[in-house]
Amino acid sequence: MGMPVPVQAYYTVDEVLAFPDDGNRYELVYGKLLVSPSPVLRHQRIVMRLVRRMADYCDKEAAGEVFGTAADLTWGRDDILTQPDVFVVGPEDAHLREWSALRHIPLVAEVLSPSTKGHDRFDKRRVYQDVRVGLYWIVDGEENQVEVWTPDAHFPLIEREQLVWKPAGATAPLTIDLPALFAV
């Protein structure tokens, strides 16, 4: 068992990255620490379906690189650190070697868990809008729907049948069938 994480009002990226590896996911939103446990099985199934579908599409369309792994995205700031469930690195950032150097994230998808709903819907959404992530999908497996947010949206578009994404330069859109995504 590692050392306990200190409790304080405001954190920096360096402080959070120094925390012991205790199985929790630590994220930072404008200095506010977000802590969540490992995701449940259904969450991970949905994440893997998204990653496979999106990676095949991005490879075919040269639309960027898809990640479904822990990443420390900071956009070069010391008060933001997020670890999206699934995200696309734009082609213009393909040459970069450090998470902290990434600036062009055209799409982020967060799959809701009971312990992350509030953070994903409010705290992290605000960050993704502020740093101008092109599309932010909040994937709700309990409701079998996806909230689609854009940087300037005040309210989401709710999708229950399909998601569609067509990045600049793509010849065809990515279409994800939501009933298939949510199938057990």
Image: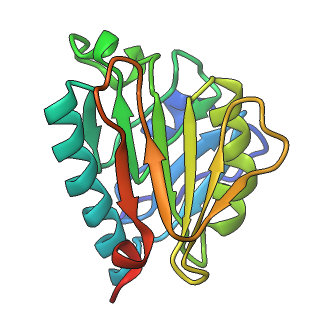
Q: Residue at x 41, y 27 (%)?
A: 167
Is 181 above or below relative to 59?
below
Q: How is the image coloured?
A: rainbow
Q: Residue furthest right?
A: 154
What percent of the width, then of the height, locates residue 47?
34, 63
What percent of the width, then of the height, locates residue 28?
61, 41
Instruction: For the C terminus, give its image quadrant.
Output: bottom left
Residue 40 visible in the snapshot: no
Q: Residue at x 69, y 30 (%)?
A: 151
- As rendered, which of 20 and 125 lies closer to the eye? 125
What percent of the width, then of the height, locates residue 20?
39, 52
Q: Residue at x 77, y 30 (%)?
A: 152
Is 2 above or below relative to 57?
below
Q: How many marks?
A: 0
Q: Residue at x 51, y 41 (%)?
A: 82
Instruction: For the N terminus, give its image quadrant.
Output: bottom left
Q: Residue furthest front?
A: 171
Q: Is residue 105 left or right of residue 89?
A: right
- As rendered, which of 57 and 40 lies closer to the eye? 57
Q: Residue furthest bottom?
A: 184
Q: Is residue 156 left or right of residue 128?
A: right
Is 170 above or below relative to 85?
above
Is 105 above or below relative to 184?
above
Residue 106 visible in the snapshot: yes
What percent of the width, then of the height, locates residue 133?
56, 29
Q: Quadrant of residue 170?
A: top left
Q: Quadrant of residue 102?
A: top left
